[in-house]
Amino acid sequence: MRFKGVLSWCLALGMLVILSVPAFADGGNLEVAIGKLQARLEELEKKVEKQESHIKDQESTIGSQQEKIGAYESKFASFEENLHRVPGEPLQILEGLELGAGGTVILQGADNTNYRDGDTQKASRADASYSADVTLSKEFKEIGGRAFIHLEAGQGAGLEDNLTLYSNVNRDSGDSEAKVELTEFWYEQDLFNGKSALTFGKLDPTAYFDQNEIANDETTQFLSWIFRNSPALEFPDNGAGVRFAWMPAEWLELGYGLFDGTGSWEDVGDSLFNIGQVHFKTNFLNLPGNYRFYAWNSNADHTKWLDSEKTKESAYGFGLSFDQKVNEIVTLFARYGWQNPEVYNPEITAADGSNYSLEQSWSAGFQVEGKPWGRENDAFGMAVGQVMPSDDYKNANSGFQAKAEGHLEAYYRIYVNKHLSVSPDIQYIWNPFGKDIPGNTSGIFVGGLRAQVDF
């Protein structure tokens, strides 16, 4: 554009010279010639300005088109990344917005259903159940916040309504009669430069407390309740709650939760469930481990075993959950829990409607990845544990044996493809319900098959 301006001035100067010659020759017409020349010069300047403006418009249009091309390239890259993402990981549909979906189908059979429509005689039975989950989350990077919604539907109680146990055999069963339910809905805000987080809304307490790396997911790991969370920890149903976490160091996390103890959203201040947890994150010899210690208190109404008139008692307890990777393929875990043995929650019953309360529970086990036999995406897990009723429960029920109920479980997760895994699962329960089922104290063998689909 500068070159065009110089050229215009050169042309104008040349015309001045040409026009000046006759003017000098005529003697006296110089002023007229100069006036014409100035008018012509102004006309040329206007044309040059118009041309420069047109060029600027073209450059702006080109820049806008390049921005659009860059945006399309970014969207295509995101789409291509989602095509090759690990199944089960959320699908990023818009910037910061992620969609996740999955489903679980379980078939289980037992050789001794110790409760079946009032029939306490031995009977074999097979039942199925399924669950489907859809999650939607949004991250607000500019303010350090995130929101989360979890929709769930399921059908079939499996064997759970046919077995009278302290701790049942299918943690995934949750018969919503195929109706979609909102199981989680919360907002989380980072605080103090990301060293703390505050979460509130409809929360699942098990997502924040008593976690475990290899014994915390009934869709891909152990199915039995005792190996999912401690039965001696009286978690309330998902409901109104707030949770605060503080991470003063990379190896330490302190957590506290306050939840509606009944999950009903009614009179939430009258039945609060409090829990605090200390979580140590270790890395011995580059092998990760997690060591969690917690204590809890529930103000929901509990009844005293040896004084039934006391119906407004509280419950409390403590426990631990450890997991440690010991080499490239093997991870170990252990859990222990204890709770107040003098009271029981009348809302917690066995399949036959019986009230009971637990005093202690322990479990331990391992997971081995399938790399040594050429199946690196497979996994084998085995665990054993016991659930121990309280002495006050035994004393309040004359003639009860109230023995420790034992559980053994093993599964093998077969990687079929990136969207499907299938897990044969076996369980054995001895001393079911403390051997206090009239006419039926035999052990129970449960065989099952689980399919997990990730979208």
Image (cartoon, rainbow, N blue to C red):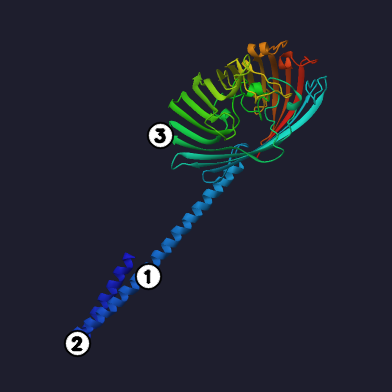
Q: Quadrant of the C terminus?
A: top right
Mark 2 falls on what kind of element? loop
Farthest left residue in view: 27
Callout 3 touching callout 1 (CB < 8 Å): no
Callout 1 touching callout 2 (CB < 8 Å): no
Farthest front residue in view: 309
Q: Quadrant of the N terminus?
A: bottom left
In the picture, the disc for residue 174 is none
Amino acid type for the residue under numbered disc 2: Asn
In the rendered image of this protein, does residue 324 appear above or below residue 23?
above
Q: Does any portion of residue 64 appear in the rendered image?
A: yes
For residue 27, what is the image quadrant?
bottom left
First in sequence: mark 1 vs mark 2 = 2
Mark 3 to mark 1 CA distance (whole Å):
53 Å
Q: Which residue is mark 3?
A: 193
Q: Which residue is mark 1?
A: 51
Disc 1: CA contacts within 10 A as few (<14), some (14-19) or many (>=20): some
Amino acid type for the residue under numbered disc 3: Asn
**177 relative to 206 in the view: left or right:** right
Residue at 51 percent of width and 28 percent of height:
257
Mark 3 falls on what kind of element? loop
For residue 103, what is the image quadrant?
top right
In the picture, the disc for residue 29 is 2
Amino acid type for the residue under numbered disc 1: Gln
Residue at 50 percent of width and 34 percent of height:
199
